Amino acid sequence: MIRRRVFFLLTALGAMAARNTASAADYTYSGSLGLLSAEAKFQASGSNLLVTLTNISLNDVTDPTEVLTAVYFNISGSPLGLTRTSAILGVGSNVFFGSTDPGNVVGGEWAFYENATGTPFGQNTAISSAGLGVAGTGGNFPGSNLQGPVNVDGLQYGITSAGDNTATGNAPVTGGNALIKNSVVFTLAGLPANFDPSTRISGVQFQYGTANCATPGTLDFCIPDYPEPASLALLTLGSVLLVRRRTR
């Protein structure tokens, strides 16, 4: 495991947020921890919720613990009974060491769960490519089983960084698993009227690798939107934590 030094910014992260109120229906959470950096954009479009998950790190990925494999979050009023509509590559994204279904579909390698159990800080919703012991209402997005077991499990089709050199690193990240560079767009249908992500979504947390952050000793591989006071003590002293939330 990579050891990271951590320094906490003990200001309320809501006060650190940079907000642009041009559109209350689009809301973006981003965070960094050491070499890791990720972003999740939530957009309400009619009755659809679009979630764009991006590994925005400019660092090379050399180890599975640097591959983005899940995002956890809370939706107030969950479960809403959302329908898994699609999971496709984001604009400018590619799959290395693997393929997609027609239309850049990778849904068979990603799952969505409402009323979730097994999330690190009790979030009620999860989108994951690695299983991670998370369960709930839902399952795989539409699409073929492109690699590995039918139920999502392992590193395959996790999201590598924008700065990754896919020729460097250990075997799991240089051909052992298909990897996506650098984003996936998930569409979920069935939002209630006037759903506003900026008020209905919270507790966003980014998961890396294949060990659930709820497992002792693996919390370095999650970037929380905001750690609860009790969880601060669990983070290894000396890491760098910076998360911001903004509307677009």
Image: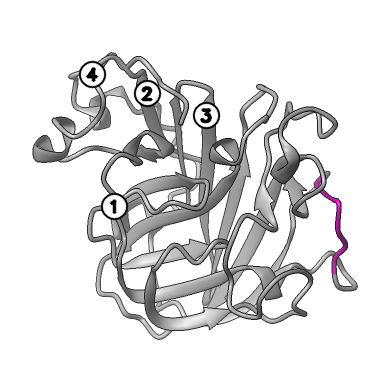
- Which residue is labeled 3 in the image? 36
- The amino acid sitting under disc 1 is Ala
Estimate how packed mark 3 is, as few (under 14), some (14 to 19) or many (20 or more) residues with alpha carbons within 10 Å. Answer: many
Q: Earlier in the sequence, mark 4 or mark 2?
A: 4
Mark toward the viewer: 1 or 2: 1
Q: Is any atom of residue 182 visible in this view? A: no
* Mark 3 and mark 1 residues within 8 Å of each other at the beta carbon: no
Q: Amino acid at mark 2?
A: Leu
- The first of marks 4 and 3 along the sequence is 3
Name the chief secondary structure element in magenta: loop
Magenta-highlighted residues? 93-100
Which of the pair 19/86 is nearer the observer? 86
Measured Cα–Cα span from mark 3 to mark 1:
18 Å
Q: Position of residue 127 (x, y in %)?
A: 49, 64
Q: Is residue 182 left or right of residue 117?
A: right
Q: Is residue 95 magenta?
A: yes
Instruction: State the separation of the CA atoms marked 4 and 2.
Output: 15 Å
Please give the residue where the numbered disc 1 appears in the rendered image: 214
Task: State how far apart marks 4 and 3 are (Cα).
Answer: 17 Å
Q: Amino acid at mark 4?
A: Leu
Q: Is residue 179 magenta?
A: no
- Residue occupied by mark 2: 242
Judge whether residue 17 can be spotted in this image.
Answer: yes
- In screen coordinates, is 106 left or right of 43? right
What's the residue at 46%, 31% (across, down)? 1
| Mark 1 Cα shell of 10 Å, populated few (<14), some (14-19), many (≥20) | some
